[in-house]
Image: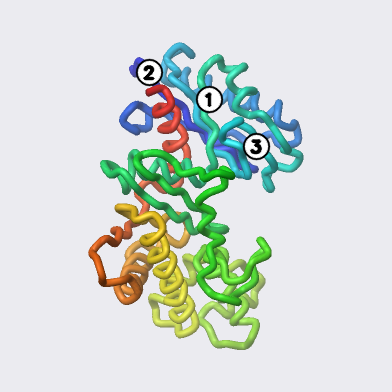
Amino acid sequence: MTSQAAIGIDLGGTNLKGAAVDADGGLLAQHAIPTDLPGGPEAVVAGMVDLADGLLNRLSVSRQALVGLGVGSPGPLSIREGRIIDAANLPGWKDVPLRELLRSKLGAPVVLENDGNAAAYGEFWAGAGRGGADLVMLTLGTGVGAGVIIDGAVLHGHFENAAELGHTVVAVDGLPCACGQRGCLEQYCSAAGMARRVCSAIDDGEPCALSEVAGSGRTIDAAQVAQAARSGDRLCSRLWDDACRHLAVACVNIQHTFNPACVVLGGGMAEAGSFLLDGVTAHFAKQRWHLHEDFPTIKLAELGYDAGVIGAAGLAWRAMR
């Protein structure tokens, strides 16, 4: 039985994922419940409190054992004020003082953090970056989430919106992005972007091993693209290599901007393992500068889908120190 624990919660539009975590980043208990979006913020807050209490009950401890609660939330946020400003996948959530709502219900310290930053902190604290001081993480999923850890702290920036690295431009006048820019990293290197580019090429008449899947109306995903590329499909191999090249460009830019010890790749694209990592590191070796050996190690994430809740809990532990 543990004497103290922090709880991390990932606030998603479909589910609330929660975990109780010890001071060393070890998972003590996990659970998830549906997010009651129709009930509004008050109902979701009540669900978070119930989730936290349930996790503590699993550990046979009371709220007095709770050192704090960390929440990883979609943004934009005001970290200073503990508010969700306007979350796209949480309809009606505008200017919600989530930190204070939870603190008043739980009677414990609460930390609110961007979900990408929480995942990055999880990898820094208990995953691929453990034992280091600096880390940049790219989460290659529906978009490209990111988090930057400098000297052990999350980088927020003056406007509290730092590390939107998915919207750094890697191709001038490139593919249009929903953000209004062109050539954003996430158009080339997210799992969704990868699948979208293959489908577009198939629609344009390029031969592909996945043409039958696309023609049947079934969804193509990044895992299928990776497998087809491994098997030698020309279209998938070309676009996969192109994604690796653009990721390498991003890593070079990260090197010169933040100079971290490591860049960690997570999310759906990273599930391809060494097939992604080897491609990125090969392109990085060609493109990085050679004036000084100050380039980061590029690694795969280790915590998978637990990174966000572990990181949120880790930020709660950090806040009490």
Query: Residue 110's mark?
Result: 1
Mark 1 or 3 closer to N-term?
A: 3
- Where does the image place residue 77, in percent across and percent down from the top left? 61, 40
Q: CA distance from mark 1 to mark 3?
A: 14 Å
- Please name the residue that numbered disc 2 is placed on: 4
Does residue 194 show up?
A: no
Residue sitting at x 57%, y 58%: 142
- SS at circle 2: loop
Label 1–label 2 contact, CB within 8 A: no
Q: CA distance from mark 3 to mark 2?
A: 28 Å
Where 321 sits versus 31, above or below? above
Q: Where, quadrant-wise, is the N terminus in this rendering?
A: top left
Considering depth in this image, is 279 or 109 the residue closer to the camera?
109
Amino acid at circle 2: Gln
Specify few, some or many for label 2: CA neighbours under 10 Å numbering under 14, 14-19, or 20 or more.
some
- SS at circle 3: strand
Mark 3 or 2 closer to N-term?
A: 2
- Please name the residue that numbered disc 3 is placed on: 84
Where 97 sits versus 173, above or below? above
Considering depth in this image, is 202 or 299 the residue closer to the camera?
299
Left or right of 218 in this view: 132: left
Residue sitting at x 73%, y 38%: 94
